[in-house]
Amino acid sequence: MYCDLISTKKTPELESMAQELDLILFPIEEFKVVDGINDSVIRDALESKNVDIVLNPHQARKKDALHSRNSGLNQVLCALASKNKVAIAVSLDYCYEAQDLGRVMQNIILCRKAKIPFLFVSLAKNLYELRNPRDIISFGLILGMSTQEATRSVSVLGEIFKKKRY
């Protein structure tokens, strides 16, 4: 079953659209989500065992260096995330520039190496912002994920929710 994180309360319209799209919706309040606004916030979140998801670690970056990409994550931070079981999420709202796509691709590679759950979320505020899970899977394939990784990126939220409950 596919899952998505929304930034508003569930409404009957959202629920009916989610049923059509074969989605389970989780409000953002049900998880401990930290927005990756700068390096210190990201590091503190990844060092904490109380955080479930770090959202958009690439968003606060201004410029990349000449020969390297500053994507908000590195091997050390990925090791911390793996140790503390923190997932990395990217909101589809922040994937609209080529530079952002390159940073997301870099984060996918780093998460793959460290075996960290990587997920795409829509953070929909209304029913028109919901995305079809198959479109998100296709987007993940374009960014360099395998089919299994792309499918997992839209279903891993349910696993995180189950672990939180038990």
Image (cartoon, rainbow, N blue to C red):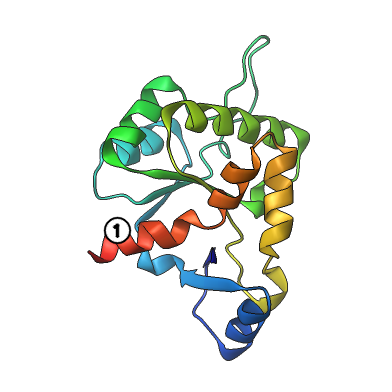
Quadrant including the C terminus: bottom left
Residue at the extreme bottom: 12
Kind of residue indicated by mark 1: Lys
Residue 140 or residue 9, whichever sits in front? 140
Residue 46 or residue 119, whichever sits in front? 119
| Residue 158, picture quadrant | bottom left
Question: Residue drawn at (62%, 73%), measured in percent from left and top?
Answer: 22
Q: Percent from the top left, x then y, of residue 124?
A: 61, 68
Question: Residue drawn at (25%, 41%), measured in percent from left and top?
Answer: 48
Does residue 5 lie above or below 72 as drawn? Answer: below
Question: Residue drawn at (55%, 86%), measured in percent from left and top?
Answer: 11
Does residue 10 lie above or below 63 as drawn? Answer: below
Residue at the extreme front: 148
| Residue 116, picture quadrant | top left
Does residue 147 lie above or below 21 as drawn? Answer: above
Question: Residue drawn at (64%, 38%), measured in percent from left and top?
Answer: 146
State the residue position of label 1: 163
Identify the secondary structure beneath mark 1: helix
Q: Percent from the top left, x then y, of residue 144?
A: 68, 33
- In the rendered view, does 90 fall on the left or right side of 40? right
What count of labels does the image hold? Answer: 1
Residue 38 or residue 166, whichever sits in front? 166
Mark 1: few, some, or many residues within 10 Å (few <14, many ≥20)? few
Does residue 58 lie above or below 127 as drawn? Answer: above
Quadrant including the N terminus: bottom right
Residue at the extreme top: 67
